[in-house]
Image (tube, helix red, strand yellow):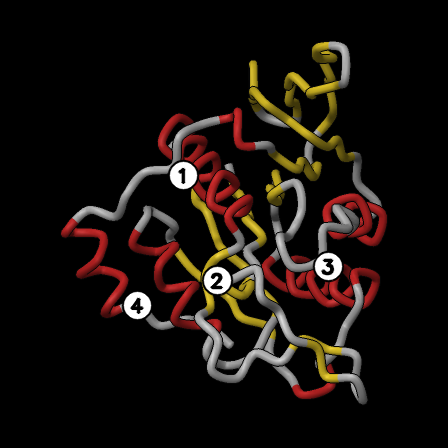
Amino acid sequence: MNIVVCVKQVPGTNEVKMNEETNTIIREGMEAIINPFDTYAVEEGVRLKEQTDGKVTAISMGIPSVADLLKETIGLGVDEAVLLSDRTFAGADSLATSYALAKGIEKIGGVDLIICGKQATDGDTAQVGPSLAEKLGIPHTTYVKKIEEISEGYIRCERMTDDGYEVIEMTLPAVITVVKEINEPRLPSMKGMMRAKKAVVQV
């Protein structure tokens, strides 16, 4: 099972300032963290890797320093990390972001499942996961709270709704976005932290 987890760097504060000329977030001097919803995606990816004896790759689009955050995912059990970074990505909206991620995932190749957090705390659009699936031409479902079964070419999961949940079955490859009810993210082990320190993020 070849799994890709999408990770985004977001400001570690609610006091976000905008550049009025470029209409982008001013990130200088601001603590950066992994988007909290993406930590559940990372955890689910690592759990599935352990269950299926598979491989999990974290991918992100951002500035060069995002490589350090991607190393954190390696400390949590991710096997490899890929950073898409270019000045032309500055100010990208969800459409441009999903396009770039789709091209990166196509280059990785042979992916069975792509997992995203349900949304980013700095944008709250919840559009990247579904848009990514559309760009790749594969099925998707959102707000997944449980993966009931996954096997070669097939996944069945529970999707949260306002009234309870739906059971969704899809062929693989596919994209899912997950909610915090799906798991409890782990802390990095000492072995994981040592591995992360030595890791090289592919840019």
Front of the two marks 2 and 4: 2
Give the structural element (helix, strand or loop) at label 1: helix
The residue closer to the viewer here, 29 or 177, is 29
The residue closer to the viewer here, 164 or 166, is 164
- Residue tagged 2: 12
How far apart marks 1 and 2 lie (CA) works out to: 24 Å
User: Dot 3, crowdedness within 10 Å: few (<14), some or many (≥20)?
Assistant: some
The mark nearer the N terminus, 2 or 4, is 2
- Residue tagged 3: 102
Q: Which amino acid type is shown beneath numbered disc 1?
A: Val
- Residue tagged 1: 46
Q: Determine the residue positioned at 58% across, 53% down.
A: 6
Pointers 1 and 3 in contact (C-beta within 8 Å): no
Point out which mark residue 199 bears: 4
Q: Is residue 104 above or below residue 163?
A: below
The residue closer to the viewer here, 151 or 158, is 158
The image shows residue 22 at horizontal and vertical percentages of: 79, 85
The image shows residue 128 at horizontal and vertical percentages of: 75, 52
Left or right: where 70 falls relative to 20: left
The mark nearer the N terminus, 2 or 3, is 2
Q: Is residue 198 above or below residue 65?
A: above
The mark nearer the N terminus, 3 or 4, is 3
